Amino acid sequence: MGRGNSAAAQKKVKTMTKITANNLSAASFTAAEAASFLPLAAAAAIKGKAEIDAAKAKGASALAVMIAAFASDEISDKAWSFDVTASGDVHEHVDCVGIAQFGDDTLPWIRNGEGKVSRAAQGAYKAAFQRTMFGLDKPSDAVWTPCTKAVPIARAIRAEGMVATIENGELKLSGGNGPIAEAMRDAKSIAALTKIAKGETGTNRAGHGNAKGEGEAGEARVATPSEVLALAARLVEGAAKGEEALSPAALSFARKIAKLVAANPDAFAED
């Protein structure tokens, strides 16, 4: 799982001779290629342009490029490191791999002597991440904010064995099996994709928010048991492999499910 973006699996898309910040919105490229365009995405974000030269049309947003790039093997397998310093001295050397440590506040190096989250460690990671991924000498909130949105989606893409590409300036997903992958492929916007990746329910992905009537697109719906359990299975499997960091509350629910299944084999036996 999580190897859906290997070079062999990448969809063949036509790439421009030279991609710049000015033509990024009309470009087509693979997730692997998107990894090399992260500095352009950073430049777009810093300038405050979600879409570079197509304004409200189909331009490739900095967020879309980040999602595709973070979902690639090139980024996921990228080994990098940084130092957490205190009073000018190296307090701890941290080895990282891709986006694996992103947002995980349970790791030992991010905690201080009192067991609390260290702002110094957080800041060091934030600066090193942007330097490594985007080539930025100084961290920028304009880049970091879309990163916090892109990483969960990229993780879900890889967890579902899907392939991400940028085609004519838009994020496209293919591959994967099951209800979550299907929902992600059918998502009509990155906002909808974000909800699916986080396991949230709400607006139907296929329609407008103002649609009304039972079963019509846009109406809030409750996730089916299959969807809920599919997501739970993915999260538990990711936690078991060390690829997913679950909160104490989430881990408690996972243990409760495991105990119930183990204690009631007949109820959960295969037909």
Image (cartoon, grey):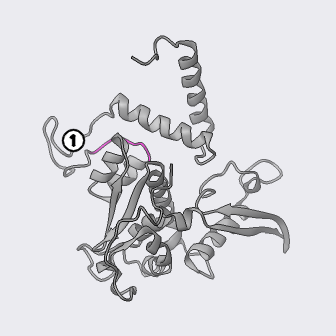
Q: Which residues are magenta?
A: 198-203
Residue bearing mark 1:
219
Of residue 83 and residue 98, the one placed in the foreground of this image is 98
Q: Position of residue 251 (x, y in %)?
A: 60, 34
Q: Is residue 78 above or below residue 173?
A: below
**Label 1, residues with CA under 10 Å away: few <14, some 14-19, many ≥20:** many
- Judge by depth and name the residue closer to the eye, 72 or 171: 72
Which kind of residue does numbered mark 1 sit on? Glu
Q: In which quarter of the view is residue 204 placed?
A: top left
Point out residue 240 in the picture as x, y percentages from the top left corner: 61, 39
Residue positioned 27% across, 78% down in the render: 55
**Quadrant of the image occupied by residue 90:** bottom right
Q: Of 176 and 102, which appears nearest the observer? A: 176
Q: Residue furthest left?
A: 213
Give the image location of residue 20, x and y in percent.
Answer: 40, 87
Counting from the top left corner in percent of width and height, residue 2 is at: 50, 53
Q: Main secondary structure of the magenta part?
A: loop
Q: Is residue 49 left or right of residue 235?
A: left
Q: Eyeballing the image, is 112 above or below 90?
A: above
Q: Is residue 127 left or right of residue 39?
A: right
Is 143 magenta? The answer is no
At x 55% / y 37%, what residue is drawn? 236
